[in-house]
Image (cartoon, rainbow, N blue to C red):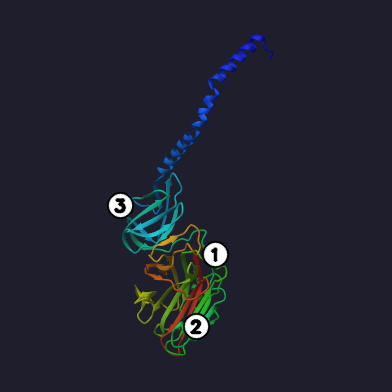
């Protein structure tokens, strides 16, 4: 476009007026205000962070009532989330005013074992500057059932198929030790008509008693890749067992079933022995618990426990690692320095479909083991010159 002299003069006039709107001294003055402007912006941002707060905490599972008591089965699968203007850093679950679970995650997914009867439960969520709790819910534990493991759980299946070890060392206990492993298959006893597993394989444990108190231990360890489950604190142990009709209850002193884990923690390797047995002499179910300053067999209050012969029995244990205070704490990322679950807690036992609350907390020991995970069964005789037999089948151990 061509401009006439008049248009050029008009353009120059407009440009001069534009510069007059923002003269140099105005720009200089504006620049001088920049530090104060930045401080103001910083204060606004700080005040925004200062009012950051947990807005709401919501329990997705179980479905609790705000107006009445909710009947539940233990262990309780508790799932919760929270709303916040910043990141949630963790949760604490309280039952009857006591801490029963703690984590350091944006959400919560926990299995909490409670004894029968009425309880009060609430959940508190935290961020870096605030916290908020749900209302207190009234619950009533009316029964028990094994938990459902999460998809990401570590599964050791068909443990009964593989290489087992017979421990006849005097440290097992008893006056003598004469255990052996025999072939599993039989056309007579055990009764294969109700064999629980699908592959027809398992373990056949025997003690040919050479003295009155003849004890032998049968175990299988999983030490390879033990780091894969070192940080696990929940364990679901499941197996079937069978006592032949030729093994008389009067010849058994005790029938023992144990699950164990050895974990490298900040002060060394801790061994967690979840020990249980049926004491055939007293017909009492017993757990390996503290008493008189030591770990020993303590009655669990469950009787009778002598198992019928000639039929398969199904056992399922749920046990946990917990802190010395009795609650479970899940660190954000497992490491020996962050794992504070140095004690063990007995949860539930299910025998032939009947679930029972065990309860009881014990400390771990430091026997000088290497990290491992495993299971074991023990036969103890109460008579000389008798044969005790036990078959194990369909055994698994799931941990998370």
Q: Which residue extends farthest right? A: 2
Q: Can see residue 388?
A: no
Tag 1 or tag 2, which sits nearer the N-term?
Answer: 2
Instruction: Using a 10 Å C-alpha cutoff, classify the residue at mark 3 as few (fewer than 14 neighbours), some (14 to 19) or many (20 or more).
Output: few
Q: CA distance from mark 2 to mark 1?
A: 33 Å
Numbered tag placed on residue 228 in the rendering: 1
* Mark 2 element type: strand
Q: CA distance from mark 2 to mark 3?
A: 54 Å
Q: Which residue shows up at 50% across the image and 80% down it?
A: 205
Marks 1 and 3 in Cβ contact (< 8 Å): no
* Image coordinates for residue 257, horizontal then vertical, percent: 45, 75
* Residue 288 position (above or below residue 139): below
Q: CA distance from mark 1 to mark 3?
A: 43 Å
In the rendered view, does 361 fall on the left or right side of 200?
A: left
**Which of 200 and 37 lies nearest the eye of the viewer?**
37
Q: Tell me how many marks there are.
A: 3
The quadrant in which the N terminus is found is top right
Q: Quadrant of residue 344?
A: bottom left
Circle 3 sits on which residue? Answer: 68
Tag 3 or tag 2, which sits nearer the N-term?
Answer: 3
Numbered tag placed on residue 293 in the rendering: none
* Residue 392 position (above or below residue 326): below
Circle 2 sits on which residue? Answer: 206
Front label number (2 vs 1): 1
* Image coordinates for residue 232, horizontal then vertical, percent: 49, 64
* Mark 3 element type: loop
Q: Quadrant of residue 112?
A: bottom left
**Which of 26 and 272 lies nearest the eye of the viewer?**
26
Instruction: Using a 10 Å C-alpha cutoff, classify the residue at mark 1 as few (fewer than 14 neighbours), some (14 to 19) or many (20 or more).
Output: few
* Mark 1 element type: helix
**Which of 340 and 180 lies nearest the eye of the viewer?**
340
Marks 2 and 3 in Cβ contact (< 8 Å): no
């Amino acid at each position: 476009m061509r401009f006439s002299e008049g248009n050029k003069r008009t353009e120059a006039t407009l440009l001069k007026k534009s510069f007059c709107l923002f003269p140099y001294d105005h720009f200089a003055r504006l620049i001088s205000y920049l530090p104060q402007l930045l401080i103001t912006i910083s204060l606004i941002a700080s005040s925004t962070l200062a009012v950051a707060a947990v807005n709401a905490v919501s329990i997705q599972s179980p479905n609790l009532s705000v107006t009445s008591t909710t009947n539940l089965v233990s262990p309780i699968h508790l799932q919760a989330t929270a709303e916040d203007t910043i990141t949630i850093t963790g949760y604490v679950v309280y039952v009857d005013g006591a801490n029963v679970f703690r984590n350091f995650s944006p959400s919560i997914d926990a299995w909490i074992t409670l004894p029968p009867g009425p309880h009060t439960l609430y959940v508190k969520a935290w961020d870096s500057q605030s916290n908020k709790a749900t209302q207190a819910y009234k619950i009533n534990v009316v029964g028990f059932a094994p938990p459902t493991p999460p998809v990401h759980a570590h599964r050791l299946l068909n443990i009964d198929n593989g290489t087992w070890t017979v421990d006849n060392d005097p440290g097992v206990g008893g006056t003598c030790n004469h255990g052996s492993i025999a072939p599993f298959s039989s056309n007579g006893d055990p009764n294969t008509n109700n064999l629980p597993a699908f592959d027809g394989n398992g373990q056949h444990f025997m003690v040919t008693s050479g003295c009155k108190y003849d004890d032998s231990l049968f175990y299988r360890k999983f030490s390879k890749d033990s780091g894969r489950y070192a940080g696990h604190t929940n364990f679901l142990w499941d197996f079937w067992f069978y006592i032949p009709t030729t093994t008389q209850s009067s010849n058994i002193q005790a029938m023992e079933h144990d699950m164990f884990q050895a974990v490298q923690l900040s002060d060394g390797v801790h061994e967690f022995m979840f020990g249980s047995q049926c004491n055939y002499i007293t017909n009492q179910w017993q757990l390996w618990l503290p008493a008189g300053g030591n770990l020993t067999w303590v009655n669990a209050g469950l009787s009778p426990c002598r198992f019928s012969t000639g039929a398969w029995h199904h056992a399922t244990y749920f046990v946990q690692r917990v802190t010395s205070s009795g609650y479970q704490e899940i660190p954000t990322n497992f490491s020996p320095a962050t794992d504070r679950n140095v004690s063990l807690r007995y949860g539930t036992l299910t025998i032939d479909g009947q679930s029972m609350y065990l309860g009881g907390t014990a400390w771990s020991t430091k026997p000088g083991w290497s990290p491992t995970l495993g299971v074991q069964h023990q036969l103890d005789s109460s008579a000389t010159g008798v044969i005790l037999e036990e078959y194990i089948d369909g055994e698994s151990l799931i941990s998370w």
